[in-house]
Image (spheres, helix red, strand yellow):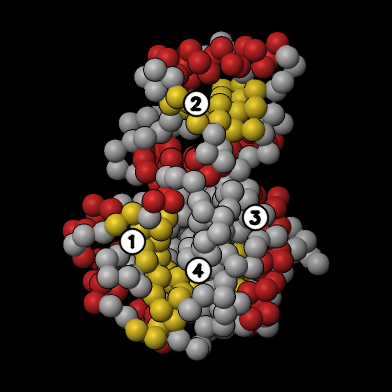
Amino acid sequence: METKRFHIDPQQIDREQIKEAANILREGGLVAFPTETVYGLGGDAMNPNASNAIYAAKGRPSDNPLIVHICEYCQLEEIASELPDAAKKLADAFWPGPMTMIVKKNEKIPLETTGGLNTVAVRFPNHPIANALIRESGCMIAAPSANTSGRPSPTSADHVWNDLNGKIEGLIDGGEVKIGLESTIVDLTEDVPMILRPGYINKEMLEEVVGPVKVDPAVLGTENVHIKPKAPGMRYKHYAPKGNLKIVTGEEKNVIAEIDRRSREDEAAGIKVGIIATEETKHAYRHGTVLCVGERKNEDQIAHNLFAVLREMDDLGMENIYSEDFSTPRIGQAIMNRLLKAAAHQVIEVS
């Protein structure tokens, strides 16, 4: 299969190219496209064959639900069997934007799109290319991240190209994404809203709109392999580089000393070792290849760069990777959720 790469400026949408990409979707094909969070791999959400094709292209387990992308609130009403009051409140506050709501679905959305569940995850993205594609196609677009399943999510078109070239019909290159972490996922099917995946919109922001919000214990813990996932990535190793990633946590000077010691030992054993550090600490390491994820005080920068740094570790052929802990105040939970999954929850605590 030949993958056509469309180059579209988000500030000046090329309508002819959007029409061509939208036609691929209408015909049951797949098109990767940028959102404000990460690149998504899109197919017609109402077409079971398109959803199956998404799973096949990604190598993704078919019980891992897809997120349906819409461009108007009324589309949520079209596919939900019931909507709690919280849905409209959250939509008014955060849509379009990096928040996904899980609601009970009706018969219009096929089970192939929802991973066999009677619920559906829905998002209204805040990106001109994504919204133009949804409108032009006339489809609600099912779109997980546009990467090989388990790999770091793509924040640039080149990341998508490296993973999916030859496996999908189209790729819209709209430049780097803004946020770099996937959307916050909120389950609205229970009495109290629950965060199943943290993101740019945090618990405090949600509670300002709808009152008490719970956080699923799996967010920063080990997933139960016997539970059917209600949201993307709840049960599988995600975002992982090819090398063995471990997170070192504790007092900063002790973290640096531990990573430096392990890196020295790895190098002596002939192992290629990488270190994920910040601007504040990158010069403290004497061994290994150090990649900077940004300034510790700049959470948005760390979130934006995380997946790209993990992919760069692959490009450099790093076999062992050590990362500092990034438990920052506002979106640190979201950053650490991704990092813990990438490391398969391998954490080294130093006192």
Task: Calculate the distance from the C-alpha at mark 2 to the C-alpha at mark 1.
Answer: 29 Å
Find numbered disc 4 in the image and state the secondary structure of the residue it sits on: strand
Task: Calculate the distance from the C-alpha at mark 4 to the C-alpha at mark 3.
Answer: 15 Å
Q: Residues within 10 Å of mark 4 (few under 14, many from 20)?
A: many
Q: Residues within 10 Å of mark 1 (few under 14, many from 20)?
A: many
The residue type indicated by label 3 comes to Ser
The answer to which image quadrant residue 235 occupies is bottom right
Find numbered disc 3 in the image and state the secondary structure of the residue it sits on: loop
Residue marked by disc 4: 67
Residue marked by disc 2: 348
Residue marked by disc 3: 149
Q: Quadrant of the C terminus?
A: top left
Front residue of 8 and 207: 207
Question: Outermost residue toward the right?
Answer: 1
Going 61% across and 21% down the picture, which residue do you hit? 289
Q: Nearer the viewer, mark 2 or mark 3?
A: 2
The answer to which image quadrant residue 327 occupies is top left
Find numbered disc 2 in the image and state the secondary structure of the residue it sits on: strand
Residue 194 disc label = 1
- Give whichever of discs 2 and 1 has the lower sequence position: 1
Q: Position of residue 282 (x, y in %)?
A: 48, 20
Task: Calculate the distance from the C-alpha at mark 1 to the C-alpha at mark 4.
Answer: 17 Å
Q: Nearer the viewer, mark 1 or mark 4?
A: 1
- Give whichever of discs 2 and 3 has the lower sequence position: 3
Q: Quadrant of the N terminus?
A: bottom right
Front residue of 211 and 33: 211
Q: Viewed as shown, does residue 138 lie left or right of 89?
A: right
Going 32% across and 80% down the picture, which residue do you hit? 83
- Give whichever of discs 4 and 2 has the lower sequence position: 4
Q: Decide: marks 4, 2 in contact (CB < 8 A)?
A: no
